[in-house]
Image: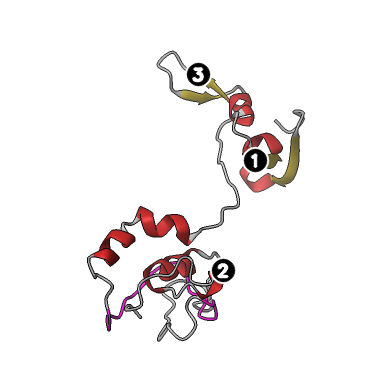
Amino acid sequence: MRSSDGTTLRRTLSALDADAVSSAEATDSTGGLWDALTRRRSDGSAATTSGIARIWLDGVRKASLDRSTGQVGAPAAWVRSYDGPGTKIAVVDTGIDATHPDLAGRVVAARNFSGSPDAEDRVGHGTHVASTASGTGAKDAGSWASPPGPS
């Protein structure tokens, strides 16, 4: 795959006997890179092509409250007044960015349960989850605000 057209070798991972490659085809809707890396078995399932033992797909993603609040059913709960005024919530996740505009003044405590040196959210997922549950929507002018109650 390293020498295939349209791929770029990002890093050789010698200890894993692996290469990290990227391709513009990985982000297109035709699945060109996937087709180059796999073959169809007779039962219809996918198998890796010769010379490739494993495939891990990775990509940069940006979470957005305009989708996630609906995916967890939050708007339906808000309509029924399940907005939790006075309720305290806990989010156990990748950490928290307490300075995020949607959470400013709403994070009352943070604790690290991992081997990380602190509770800072270096991944973004914990901050996203906390914003889904308790964000003010300040970052996007209230477009994706959670209910006013939880803190």
Q: Position of residue 69 (x, y in %)?
A: 39, 60
Which amino acid, mark 1?
Ala
Residue 2 painted magenta: no
Q: Position of residue 79 (x, y in %)?
A: 27, 64
Residue 85 shows in the view: yes
| Residue at 35 percent of width and 81 percent of height | 151
151 or 3: nearer the viewer: 151
Q: Is residue 93 above or below residue 85?
A: above
Residue under label 2: 122
* Residue carrying label 1: 18
* Mark 3 neighbour class, 10 Å CA radius: few under 14, some 14 to 19, many 20 or more: few
Q: CA distance from mark 2 to mark 3?
A: 38 Å
Q: Mark 1 packing: few (<14 Cα in 10 Å), some, or many (20+)?
A: some
First along the sequence among labels 2 and 3: 3
The answer to which quarter of the image holds residue 83 is bottom left
Q: Residue at position x 27%, y 80% from top?
A: 87
Residue 27 lies left or right of residue 70; in this view the side is: right
For label 3, the residue is: 40
What is the span of residues highlighted in magenta in the rendered image? 85-101
At which x and y percent is residue 82? 24, 70
Q: Residue at x 46, y 65 (%)?
A: 144
Q: Magenta span has 86? A: yes
Callout 2 environment at 10 Å: few (<14), some (14 to 19), or many (20+)?
few
